[in-house]
Amino acid sequence: MSSVTFESQRAALADVVAIPVTPFTADDAVDTASLRVLLRRLTDGGITTLTPCGNTGEFYALTPEERRLVTELTVEEADGRASVLVGVGHDMSTAVASARHARACGARMVMVHQPVHPYVSQGGWVDYHRAIAEAVPDLGVVPYLRNARLPGARLAELADACPNVIGVKYAVPDAARFAAFARDAGLDRFVWVAGLAEPYAPSYFSAGATGFTSGLVNVAPAVSRDMIEALRAGDHPAAMKVWERVRRFEELRAADGSADNVTVVKEALASLGLCRRDVRPPGRPLHAGARAEVAAIVAGWPA
């Protein structure tokens, strides 16, 4: 285990980490043809890290069979052009099985969704992630952190036991808390991925992040690439110009507790004729006025 450096996986995280949508057919099956088109569009647009079974992919609305299908198709379409970071989660045995399936498919990393449980202890959080990481010691493991109560020392404890824990998708909406957490855990020990997408990327990069996740990238890969290139260059004014371009789109996604987070992305894709707008409950369709606004925003972005 000590001989594994995970250099290529770490490099893949320090980039735009795309969270592809999962398109559905009119009869509510996974639309594999549209999914392939969307994945190719991402890689053709210069995106080199794909996360099947993420929240923008409606992870919690997919059946186990659908999650496996989406994983398999994504690895197949990536075909060496992109790294694949597979979202896993639910109960511990399901998460372990999903991680092993990802490995069998050829993926080299897994992202562990925040445990869905009303009572998450700090020690239990470590135990949950440790079980998954130890099941796939040759894969890079990336905890998806949404819990502001977890101290950085607990992440360091996990990595002490599991050297394949190489990065963190940090999605607590507080840049100052992120700065402290990353330093308490080990700023240089992990790849820090801003898990709240383009709106938070500039502030999180200023505190040590080197990658960010994106759902918007499904719609406009060039816009997300503009953001990462500005941030890498240390050109904060340029990054904020991209921020201004995407602000309203992301405000629509974040409204009402992010109720329309996926819906807005799929509406944008539907306006471009790339997939149906359908989302599964507990998601909801947009009203006509919001649909028109989304279409107008997207019309001003590069194809």
Image (cartoon, grey):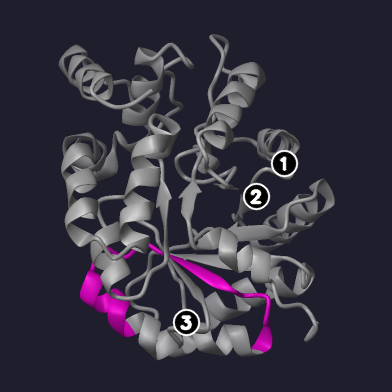
Residue 240, given in percent of the width and then of the height, sits at 18, 52
Q: Secondary structure at mark 2?
A: strand
Q: Please give the label number shown on residue 122.
A: 3
Q: Secondary structure at mark 1?
A: helix
Three-letter amino acid code at disc 2? Val
Relative horizontal placement of residue 186, taking residue 205 as reference (left or right): right
Considering every residue shown, the one lying at the far right of the view is: 104
Residue located beneath label 2 in the image: 84
Q: Nearer the viewer, mark 3 or mark 2?
A: 2
Residue 294, given in percent of the width and then of the height, sits at 24, 22
* Residue 118, quarter of the rendered image: bottom left
User: Quarter of the image containing the N terminus?
Assistant: bottom right
Q: Are marks 1 and 3 in contact (CB under 8 Å)?
A: no
Quick check: is 166 in the magenta stretch?
yes
Q: Are marks 2 and 1 in contact (CB under 8 Å)?
A: yes
Three-letter amino acid code at disc 1? Val
Relative vertical location of residue 223 with respect to residue 196 in this rendering, above or below: above
The residue that appears at 26% across and 77% down in the rendered structure is: 177
Examine the rendering and report whether any part of residue 151 can be seen: no
Quick check: is 7 in the magenta stretch?
no
Examine the rendering and report whether any part of residue 188 can be seen: yes
User: Quarter of the image containing the C terminus?
Assistant: top left
Crowd class of label 2 (few under 14; some 14 to 19; many from 20; radius 10 Å): many
Crowd class of label 1 (few under 14; some 14 to 19; many from 20; radius 10 Å): many
* Residue 64, quarter of the rendered image: top right
Q: Secondary structure at mark 3?
A: helix
Residue located beneath label 1 in the image: 75
The magenta-colored residue range is: 161-180
